[in-house]
């Protein structure tokens, strides 16, 4: 537990946690990410949208910049070690279901990609883009948002719901890029359920690195299999991945239990260590 009297006002503000601070952080991050993306727009003119160069300009560079912003923020408040350290509350065996479902369909999608049509450079660039996306989005939502919620003493069901809702809300911005309303609403439903699955992956694996890697394999598998599908019945099964993730996330969310208690006398101040008899795995 930190000595709050010795902290700067900046660090003390974030150490006290709170859901509204999580929303503010996500909003500021999204605004900076969008502004940063504009820096690369001039370089996209005349570039083939199916090329590896375009993937770097449209996805890799902007999200890499977003990841750097998040790392700088973590350094400013001294949270990086905490974010990537062991989880203070672990999960039950049933949480592996979320990991298994996401991983299974990622593997199925990777197995049903026409790699010859895609080309090595496009596949490699999407894999790099996926790693950047997984890092930035998981550090923000399953890292900072989860930590801010826990520091305020919220229950783990609230932690899961808010982190998933913030993650989904980030994708609502696709409306601004011209995406139609119905596909955006469907995307919000998927990303919310996927966010629940990633929260469960965080809990059951005990470290943020694993949902980052799981997320990093998701986006490339979806984009590549959608654009370059291989023929065969297995591709039809792989196409059910989004439905399976939505079902899994929305069902398993009802089984989430546990809480990291805030310090007595000031529930918004700081969390206490988890007691041995916690019901974290229920």
Image: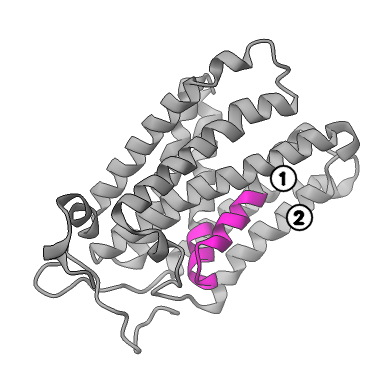
Q: Position of residue 174 (x, y in %)?
A: 50, 28
Asked which quadrant contains residue 83, the reply is: bottom left
Judge left or right: residue 253 versus residue 103. Answer: left
Identify the mark nearer the N-term, 1 or 2: 2
Q: Position of residue 65 (x, y in %)?
A: 49, 36
Q: Main secondary structure of the magenta part?
A: helix
Judge left or right: residue 242 versus residue 149. Answer: right
Residue 25 against residue 158 in the figure, above or below = above
Viewer-proximal residue, 256 or 121?
121
Residue 137, numbered label: none
Residue 174 against residue 267 in the figure, above or below = above
Does the magenta run of residues contain 219? no
Viewer-proximal residue, 173 or 10?
10
Answer whether labels 1 and 2 touch (C-beta < 8 Å): yes
Q: Secondary structure at mark 2?
A: helix
Q: Residue at x 45, y 69 (%)?
A: 85
Q: Which residues are magenta?
A: 198-217
Quarter of the image that includes the C terminus: bottom left
Judge left or right: residue 262 versus residue 49. Answer: left
Viewer-proximal residue, 137 or 157?
137
Q: Residue at x 38, y 65 (%)?
A: 82
The outermost residue toward the left is 265
Judge left or right: residue 64 versus residue 36. Answer: right
Q: Residue at x 87, y 39 (%)?
A: 114
Q: Residue at x 22, y 54 (%)?
A: 11
- Label 2, residues with CA under 10 Å away: few <14, some 14-19, many ≥20: some
According to the picture, the residue beneath numbered tag 2 turns out to be: 107
Q: CA distance from mark 1 to mark 2?
A: 8 Å
Residue 221, numbered label: 1
Q: Position of residue 226 (x, y in %)?
A: 74, 36
């Amino acid at each position: 537990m930190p000595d709050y009297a010795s902290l700067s006002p900046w660090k003390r503000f974030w150490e006290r946690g709170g859901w509204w601070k999580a929303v503010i952080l996500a909003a500021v991050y999204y605004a900076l990410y969008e502004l940063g993306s504009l820096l690369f727009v001039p370089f996209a003119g005349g570039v083939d949208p199916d090329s590896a160069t375009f993937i770097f300009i449209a996805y890799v560079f902007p999200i890499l910049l977003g990841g750097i912003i998040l790392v700088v923020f973590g350094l400013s408040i001294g949270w990086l070690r905490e974010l990537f350290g062991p989880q203070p509350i672990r999960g039950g065996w049933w949480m592996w279901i979320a990991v298994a479902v996401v991983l299974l369909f990622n593997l199925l999608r990777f197995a049903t990609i026409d790699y010859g049509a895609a080309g090595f450079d496009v596949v490699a660039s999407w894999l790099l883009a996926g790693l950047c996306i997984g890092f930035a989005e998981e550090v923000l939502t399953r890292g900072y948002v989860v930590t801010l919620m826990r520091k305020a003493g919220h229950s783990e069901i609230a932690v899961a719901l808010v982190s998933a809702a913030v993650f989904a809300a980030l994708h609502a911005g696709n409306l601004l890029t011209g995406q139609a309303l119905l596909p955006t609403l469907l995307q919000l439903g998927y990303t919310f359920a996927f966010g629940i699955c990633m929260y469960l992956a965080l809990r059951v694996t005990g470290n943020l690195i694993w949902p980052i890697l799981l997320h990093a394999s998701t986006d490339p598998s979806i984009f590549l299999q959608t654009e370059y599908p291989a023929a065969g019945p297995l591709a039809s099964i792989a196409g059910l991945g989004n439905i399976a993730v939505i079902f899994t996330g929305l069902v398993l969310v009802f089984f989430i239990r546990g809480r990291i208690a805030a310090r007595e006398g000031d529930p918004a101040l700081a969390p206490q260590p988890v007691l041995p008899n916690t019901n974290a795995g229920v």
